[in-house]
Amino acid sequence: MIQQLNNFFVSFHQVEKKMPEKYIREESMIRGPKFVVRLRSHTVYENSAIKLFCTVEGYPTPQVKWFKDDVILDVSSGKYFVESNAGFHALSILKCATDDTAMYTAVASNTHGQASSQASIIVKSKTFSPGAKRKKCPRLILGCLTSYTKINITFTETFDVTFGKEGDKATLTCRMTINPNLANLQPEAMWYRDEHLLKESRWVKMESGGGVAKLTLTQLAKDDEGLYTLRMVTKGGDAVHRACVFVDDGPPPVPQAPGAPMDIKIHDANRDYVIVSWKPPNTTTEGPIIGYFVDRCEVGTETWMQCNDSPVKICKYAVQGLFEGHSYYFRVRAVNSRGIGRPSRMSEHDVFYVHSGVPSAPGQVIATRETDTSVLIQWVPPKDPNNLIGYYIDSCVKGSKNWTSANHKPHKQTRFVVHGLTTGETYVFRVQAINELGLSDESQESAPLSVRAALKLPSSPYDLSLLYCDGESMVLSWKQPLRSGGADVTDYYIDKCNVAKKTWKEVNVPPIKERLHKVAGGLTAGSVYQFRVYGANMIGLGDASTPSTPFKCEAWTTPEPGPAYDVTFTEVRDDSVVVEWKAPVYSGASAITGYFVEKSKKGSDNWSKVNESSVNHCYLKVKGLETGESYVFRVRAENANGIGLASTLSDPVCIKTLPGKTEIKCGVDEESGDIYLSFESCQMAEKSKFVWKKSYQEITDFSKGIAVKTSGSHSTLLFKNPDKEDLGTYSVSVTHTDGASASYKISAEELEKMLALSHDIRNPIIPLKTELAYKILERGRMRFWLQAEGISSAVTYKFFANNKELVNCEQTKMSHDAATGIIEMVMDHFTVESEGTFTVQIQDGRGKAQSSLVLMGNAFKAALAEAEYQRREYIRVKEGPHFMEFLSIQVGDNASVTLVCKVANLKKDSVFQWYKDDVEVISEVPADLNSGVCKFPLTNFSKRDVGLYKATITDDRGQDVSQIDVSGKAFDDIINKLSRLAGSSASELSIQCTAEGIMLQCHMKYYTEEMKIHWKQKDSKIAASERMRIGGNPAMATLEIVEPTDKDKGMYTIEIVDPEKTHSRTLDLSGQHRGKVVGGLPDVVTIMEKKTLSLTCTVCGDPKPLVSWSKNDHEVEPSDQYVIAMDSGKFASLTIKGVSLEDSGKYTMTVQNKYGGESVDIIVSVYKHGDRVPDIKPTPSPKRIMPPTVPIVIPTAKSATPAPAAAKSPAPPQNAKSSAPPRGMKSPTPTRKK
């Protein structure tokens, strides 16, 4: 009935489980109280409201007490109001008086210490008297005067004790005189219920003024009962009146239904549930309350919905299934045996918003470099902080999933520096928010960041050049900064300056992404301009370049081409270098036909041509250079009109091979057959990239089967489907290095060889030693086979007959031998329908092979005739006895377990034999060789029957064998079937008395201890012991209770479990006990003759037992000498008056009721007066248990599963109960074991 509350606690524990170990581990770091926000001092005028507040953190949550001048505040006075919520604490004074001037202290404490914060409040009077004295306060000297006017209030009419009924309206009124009655100094009316300040609400309305104060309770409820206090607060004190209000229950919906619950409160609002608590009704005249129903109503509707299906027994309930952001009212109804009572007053707050308990996840996380071992992390705070305490920051090496906490207590800011990182390693970061309820979800991971020193601004661009001018615009280019600052230079900004005006102006506001820009607009033809360029990276704007040389804005009309630009170099070797450039923007009067490259040693003005004839592409490999010498290069374009202007000079390059340089390797991948160019760089930086080019033009089109794969310092250019278009020179360069680069030329001859090798790799052929052939086996079976040069164990193959795939089964059994390379298929039935083509397809890895065999016409007829002959011969000579049906297990409806098989083709001398674990066994049922059906019953099946069973049929023609393993899963399956039969046939529980106690019995078709059978008492599982003996026989399961006591009373259940269902039977053993002798009788009594002997003991039993006495096994009849008594139904006695020597002997007392009983013996020895007292050693005789006098009939609870009529059991029938022995006779029941 409290499932919903349990669900709440499960949800709460799930919130706790979300908090990783670090939070639990780090609680010790914030155990002591700490003031996060401290108190602040205030100076106010009298009659003003003031509020001191602070924020405290600690674990466990600290408690805060307030002090005024070191004296604890009395918050019950109604003058001071204290608030406390999730670490926020406040002290409010609604109307300050001058005597509130003091030093106020908030003291926070928990089990780990305390902390305090102080603030002063100075209350100034609005009226001043020149002669007034200064008031001296502890720790403060007030600079204010404290004269005031005293106001006296006298009540002329007050409210008395008020009685009402639920649903009624009640008004409490007080009339008073105010002296002096000043308009600007009216008293304030404050109402309290049981010392709790009341506020305006839908249930409480207040009016005050004109000498009257009223409180109206709009709709009385039991919550409104209490002591009401009116406090008229004035400047000089207050006037108080009190009286009680009593509320009677309203008429219940159902007679004798309970009253309405009270004090509805809401706690722990979360994303989809809240906790509702209440107090029980305060009336006791109705029957006991058996539970409560909780109702909810969404604000804006009038529909109440019941939240729990069954009553909850405690005054708290977790309401689930709410919608985040919605508003709800709540109410509670009590339930007793008569019905459901009136609902409580709805929850106090008109609007209640369901919100999440823990904070939402923080927003975007940004990681930026700081030093070579630390990173700065910044993030967006969560949208729903929910009393946020702080944040935890985690770091993880990219790809490892091994998260490490960066801080050991909550961090309150939204930026944090993570220290102790490995230089050069790449990390990702995430953030979690935390409050008192736990951790939020993790934020999204930051972008991966390599730990390097902080980024810097780039250096300035350089070598600005003019590429073209049309009189209105100019095309400029420049070289990128030599130092990027650790980040790519992505943006450029240009300034221009009219040389005549000497004023610099911006050319572009949006950034320029390329190092080529057309400056258009704002230029004056004929004017001279200078330009400068700024580079920017993610850090910011770098320094400006050196101003360019002055450029005149006039149109270019020369017929020769303009200058080429962006002259660079790559593939630096000991005697060569490859120079690259870009075509001129201005081509002149005709198209460009070629280029000339010129070289010069660094610092020299002597230029020489590298190529005597022009090249028609924008690159040239310059050879014959001096090792270790530095060179600069420039390029001139040529058209039909001549050679144009020289480009800007390249940067100097030292002709020397880089240490560890490598070249491009060309080959064919042995796995995929792809042709590849591979390059491993001898240098790599964090931002290094491989740039692949064809004819020194970057490859950007990957749609024709070209792909680039890069891993670390290794990059591969793959050709998926190469052809003649892929011939040419390929080069690769690595950015952010000292010039790591290489090139390779693929020729037509080389490409042809690689294509042939690629085809062989992609289409390998498994060589065959023999093609597909056949061989006819005994019994006319056909073997199709071939042999390969070599195959692996993972080879796969398929056989086809007339293009129809054959299946590996008994009729077409397929196999292979990896050692010999043989693959075969044995066809059990080769018939007329088999004529046609047989094919085998083989695949081993990527290797494939196929072979076919045609059996048609005469070739097929010959094969078929041979197969039929072999079949007939086998039947005639070799066919002997065999199994038509192999061994199987049958479990009958009578719980019998039998091994069954069927044999055929027998002769008179055929012999059938059974074996278990290779030892011959004899079946209880002889083999029926006439029908061929052979059975081996496993009588009373149990674990002793586990083993490997084998059946053989033998004669002079041969032997056939069938076997079955009765163990493991097969054994479990049998037990499960028996359990199902036992459970469905189980009878109701019965009880039998035994020599040592009682026995519970459940008859069923079959019982064995391997079944899953459980005995329970009051839903607690019973373990086998000396007192609780669990067992049975093939016909029943039993539980024997030895010497039962009161603790053994209760409901007993037997559960029989099978894989599909649990069958149960129950029996109530409450209040039924056989007669017993509790104690009091001695074993031996010696007494002098003529004395009176009294034998007394205590007996018990339910129902009350009968007691009889016997002497030497003869009943003692009551007489004047022998007095038999039974006092209070439990004190039995035998009194012998004036004993004589004839009274010596063995006395037996028997106690018995219909459930049985027991008897005890007492030896009495009488001696004469004056004789020595006989020394008789007691020989304790055990109590003897008596069987029931009539059959025991015990009412049983209805079983969860109706029990069918008990099946016939192989166990012998029970003996009928014998009648009770005559009084005074010895019981035939065997003696109890010691």
Image (cartoon, grey):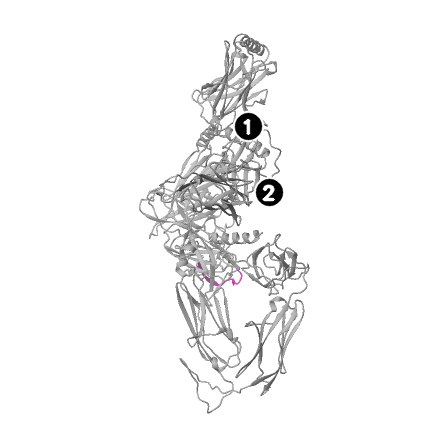
The magenta stretch spans residue 458: no
- Name the spot of residue 1086 as percent of width and height, x first: 40, 43
Q: Identify residue for label 1.
A: 1212
Disc 2 on helix, strand or loop?
loop
* N-term-proximal mark, 1 vs 2: 2
Front residue of 448 and 876 = 876
Amino acid type, residue under disc 1 in the picture? Pro
Front residue of 731 and 322 = 322
Pick the quarter of the image with the C terminus: top left
- Name the spot of residue 213 as percent of width and height, x first: 62, 79
Taking 254 as reference, is 863 above or below it?
A: above
Q: Identify residue for label 2.
A: 1197
Front residue of 446 and 58 = 58
Q: Quadrant of residue 733?
A: top left
Taking 325 as reference, is 91 above or below it?
A: below
Disc 1 on helix, strand or loop?
loop
Residue 580 visible in the current orientation:
yes
- Name the spot of residue 918 as percent of width and height, x first: 45, 20
Q: Residue at x 35, y 50 (%)?
A: 606
Amino acid type, residue under disc 2 in the picture? Ala
Question: In the drawing, does residue 829 fall left or right of residue 454?
Answer: right
Front residue of 490 and 880 = 880
Exactly how many numbered labels are in the figure? Answer: 2
Taking 875 as reference, is 255 above or below it?
A: below
Magenta-tinted stretch: 520-536
Crowd class of label 2 (few under 14; some 14 to 19; many from 20; radius 10 Å): some
